[in-house]
Image (tube, rainbow, N blue to C red):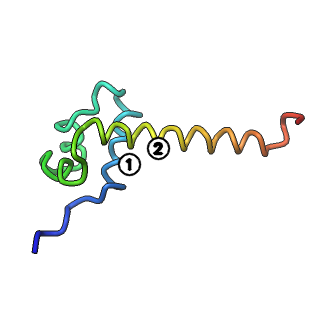
Amino acid sequence: MPPKPKHTRKEIVETAFELVREKGADFLTARELAEKLSTSPRPIFTAFESMEELKSAVILKCSELYLSFCEEEKNSGKYPE
């Protein structure tokens, strides 16, 4: 039976998102992310097949956050329909 993953996909995406917010997208590398997670790059590639897959997940998180902000603004009553 393989060992349990140290970090879930969700934790890795959250941490990658924080890294991008703090330092910018150019710093989203396996090495930088592993350092922020206090681990080696191996758990990242256990959860994701590639950095491109991880970056896509971070972009999706960004899109979801943006849409939630838009929805909040829309529902704030500040703008007429």
Residue 21 drawn at (x, y percent): 41, 34
Residue 75 drawn at (x, y percent): 78, 45
Split into 4 quadrants, where in the image is the N terminus?
bottom left
Q: Which type of secondary structure does the marked residue at label 1 adopt?
A: helix
Q: Residue furthest bottom?
A: 1
Residue of label 2: 61
Left or right: 23 in relation to 72 = left
Residue of label 1: 14
CB within 8 Å, label 1 to label 2: yes
Three-letter code, disc 2: Lys
Mark number displayed over residue 74? none
Mark with earlier residue (1, 2): 1
Decide: is 6 above or below 60: below
Q: Residue shown at 25%/48% (left/top)?
A: 48
Residue 67 drawn at (x, y percent): 61, 40
Left or right: 8 in relation to 67 = left
Q: Which type of secondary structure does the marked residue at label 2 adopt?
A: helix
Residue 55 drawn at (x, y percent): 34, 37
Q: Residue shown at 36%/55% (left/top)?
A: 10
Q: Residue furthest right?
A: 80
Three-letter code, disc 1: Glu
Front one among 53 and 32 = 53
Left or right: 78 in relation to 22 = right
Q: Quadrant of residue 59?
A: top left
Split into 4 quadrants, where in the image is the C terminus?
top right
Give neighbour class at mark 1: few <14, some 14-19, many 20+ (Cα, 10 Å). some
* Mark nearer the viewer, 1 or 2: 2
Decide: is 28 above or below 60: above
Q: Residue shown at 18%/48% (left/top)?
A: 45
